[in-house]
Image: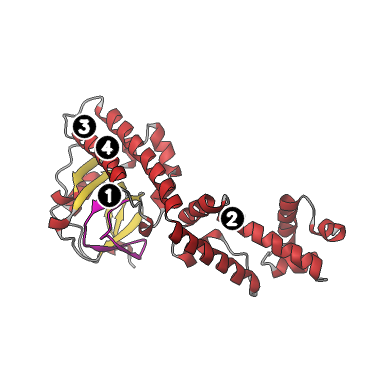
């Protein structure tokens, strides 16, 4: 895709004009109800939002792409987007059936605050849209209360306290989002169990095949159709270990088996497991077991 085909939204003014939002009261932030939008961005044209973007919606009939993947917007949820991510709307929503909020803010709006440094560590801003936060009625009420508080302050005459107050409310909203995401990981048991089963199957299939390289967390996440951060958080909540720790544990167990049941040299085992450099294998093995591969083989 040519770069000039992408619609780039770099400012709040761009944002309000492209998405049909009411004119912004502040040059670095915009908040409105989804039902107040006049129109969405042009259909079937990729959009790069260079702003932070939070959407809370319910009852929308619209499909879209985020990161070039299809996503059904018909379910009530909260979604979080970081600057630079790509979006594409396939159709306009039926505005009469839309309920929710749309909040966008420029990175400069929070840059001088602690939130400016912390927001990069909030992993849900890097999740795929299909991993949106699905909230209960009680959680929705909490989030809506905070959105209304931000809107009330946003609609006042701007003074020296406006930005401080809005950023503090935004900080609380994101703290609640972290809590709600943790709950989502722990309550969606059937979905998570299926992901864990598929994850383990991918690992076994990889290590049972001829390997040219070590499988990565990104490889597995891509095969499961989710982001690396989301998969890592899900596995950590289910098992106490993230994706990389699972890969290493599986790799070490396979290495132990080869060391004790074959006459392959350490170098041959390293290559068979996908290591390009045997010394990396030996270093990892010792860090996980306290012994070198040779020591493990001799002792056992």
Residue 4: percent from the left, percent from the top?
29, 62
Does residue 14 appear in this view? no
Is 65 contained in the magenta span?
yes
Classed neighbour count for the residue bearing mark 2: other residues with Cα under 10 Å, few (<14), some (14–19), many (≥20): some
Q: Which mark is residue 146?
A: 4
From mark 3 to mark 1, how far is it between C-alphas? 19 Å
Q: Nearer the viewer, residue 109 or 96?
A: 96
Residue 9: percent from the left, percent from the top?
27, 52
Q: Which residue is mark 1?
A: 55
Q: Which residue is mark 3?
A: 153
Point 70% across, 65% down: residue: 254
Magenta part of the chain: 57-78
Image quarter where the N terminus lies is bottom left
Secondary structure found at label 3 = helix
Q: Nearer the viewer, residue 5 or 282?
A: 282
The answer to whether the residues at label 1 and label 4 have Cβ atoms under 8 Å apart is no
Residue 229: percent from the left, percent from the top?
47, 53
């Amino acid at each position: 895709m040519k770069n000039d085909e992408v619609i780039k939204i770099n400012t709040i003014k761009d944002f309000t004009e492209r998405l049909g939002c009411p004119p912004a009261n502040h040059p670095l932030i915009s908040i409105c109800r989804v039902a107040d939008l006049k129109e969405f961005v042009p259909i079937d044209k990729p959009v790069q939002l260079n702003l932070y973007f939070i959407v809370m919606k319910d009852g929308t009939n619209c499909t879209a792409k985020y990161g070039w993947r299809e996503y059904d917007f018909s379910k009530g949820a909260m979604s979080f987007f970081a600057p630079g991510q790509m979006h594409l709307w396939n159709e306009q929503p039926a505005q009469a059936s839309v309920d929710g909020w749309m909040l966008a803010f420029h990175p400069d709006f929070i840059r001088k605050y602690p939130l400016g440094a912390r927001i990069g560590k909030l992993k849900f801003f890097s999740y795929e849209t299909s991993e949106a936060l699905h909230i209960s009625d009680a959680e929705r009420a909490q989030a809506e209360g905070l959105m209304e508080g931000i809107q009330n302050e946003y609609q006042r005459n701007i003074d020296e306290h406006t930005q401080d107050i809005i950023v503090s409310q935004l900080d609380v909203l994101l703290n609640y989002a972290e809590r709600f995401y943790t709950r989502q990981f722990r309550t969606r048991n059937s979905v998570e169990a299926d992901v864990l089963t598929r994850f383990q199957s991918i690992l076994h299939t990889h290590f049972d095949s001829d390997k040219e390289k070590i499988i990565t967390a990104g490889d597995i996440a891509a095969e499961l159709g989710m982001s690396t951060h989301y998969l890592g958080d899900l596995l950590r909540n289910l098992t106490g270990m993230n994706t990389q720790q699972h890969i290493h544990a599986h790799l070490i167990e396979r290495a132990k088996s080869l060391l004790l049941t074959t006459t392959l040299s350490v170098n041959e085992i390293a290559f068979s497991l996908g290591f390009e450099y045997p010394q990396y294998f030996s270093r990892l093995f010792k860090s996980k077991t306290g012994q070198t591969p040779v020591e493990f083989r001799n002792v056992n």
